Amino acid sequence: MKPSSRLDRLPPYLFAELERKIAEKKAAGVDVISLGIGDPDTPTPAPVIEALALAAADPGTHRYPSNRGRPELRAAFAGFYARRFGVELDPDTEIIPALGAKECVFNLNLAFLDPDSVALAADPGYPVYTGGPLLAGSEAVLMPLVPELGFAPDLDAIDGDVAARARLLYINYPNNPTGAVVPEGLFERAVEFGREHDVLIVHDASYTETTYDGYVAPSFLETPGAKDVGVEVFSLSKGWNMTGWRTAAIVGNADAVSTYWKLKTNIDSGQFEAVQLATVRALEDGPPAEMPAIYQRRRDLVCVALREIGVDVTPPKGTIYVWAPVPDGHTSASYCQLVLEESGVVVSPGGAYGPNGEGFFRISLTIDDARLSEAVERLRGSLGG
Ligand SMILES: Cc1ncc(COP(=O)(O)O)c(C=O)c1O
């Protein structure tokens, strides 16, 4: 059996060594606590589950859905964007549902990239921004996120030839993995860049609803001119505790949305209509109001403990992650292994998110308070001075 050569182009899986060590620990009877993956532990809101049950009981939802999505769903996304961001969207031309942001981001690569073109991807960043272009037969050119610029990429530093070959530019704020919120002026500069180089700006808005300390994250589409050059990928996964449901949408530039739809009609057959109707309910109700306080409390617990063990961490204003520098003398991989070794706690090595993630590690806050407190106590006990 010979797999396709496109799979060979993917970089080696950087969690492999850590996963081997975790398996080893578990086999030795250690109660490993994972703060690795960002997957909300709190259930989806009850009214959304009730809406799903009701819709699933109706045989009208059991047949092939349309890739355009039900009109109620597109109207619900338009209503949410108007209320939440003050952004007007045409439900007929500027919104298509997606099976999660991951599907959407991946398929945008197939829809827009040729072998001689490139995608510009944040480094560190969500791995699909780099793996997607490779699988699409193209490649990603990394844009370092500069800590001194608030983890913004320096768009003026992008080489002219690269800019000329670029078709897509991925940005994501609040940002995974750094927890940064959008630096002032970045969205405006991205619109200019899109215009100057005929590049589709793709803003991944997976974390706009998980923010703290009173910070309210904007939509990229609030930026003047954004719809001329860009789209936003909006997901309910993190904000509504719905990672398993696979529900999101691409919104914005009508030509780009239609290109995505054209590709998608050849790949999948849309989203189960009962999930669409449950998503309508979720959008109408808005994200569960209690979540920011829950994550903020966990964030503070983690940041206080990290400071006590000598880690110089800045509490993030958004996302469900804490991003912190590894202490001197360590690489991100060696520090994550030390943490696992000494305390049985799994944290993610920053290098797994790109070369510029080296020197950092990421902690996810999606674990219940009791386990998180225990993880924090173990860190204090085993790594504290
Ligand atoms: C930046 C970013 N985009 C997209 C996703 C995937 O979201 P979804 O569950 O909607 O596919 C994640 C998940 O961790 C993410 O961090």
Image: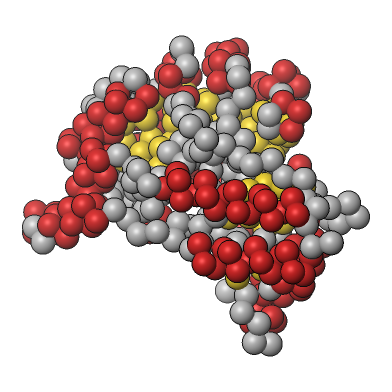
Seen at 69% across and 69% down, the residue is: 378
Q: Position of residue 235 (x, y in %)?
A: 40, 42
The foreground one among 126 and 340 is: 340
Q: Is residue 213 left or right of residue 262?
A: right
Q: Is residue 79 left or right of residue 357?
A: left
Can residue 331 be seen here? yes
Q: Position of residue 371 (x, y in %)?
A: 54, 68
The foreground one among 363 and 262 is: 363
The picture quadrant where one finds residue 301 is bottom right
Q: Position of residue 61 (x, y in %)?
A: 14, 54
Seen at 18% across and 35% down, the residue is: 71
Seen at 33% across and 46% down, the residue is: 288
Quadrant of the frame with the N terminus? bottom right
Q: Is residue 77 above or below residue 124?
A: above
Q: Position of residue 185 (x, y in %)?
A: 60, 17
Seen at 50% across and 30% down, the residue is: 215
Quadrant of the frame with the C terminus? bottom right
The picture quadrant where one finds residue 136 is top right
Q: Is residue 320 left or right of residue 8?
A: left
Q: Is residue 294 left or right of residue 168?
A: left
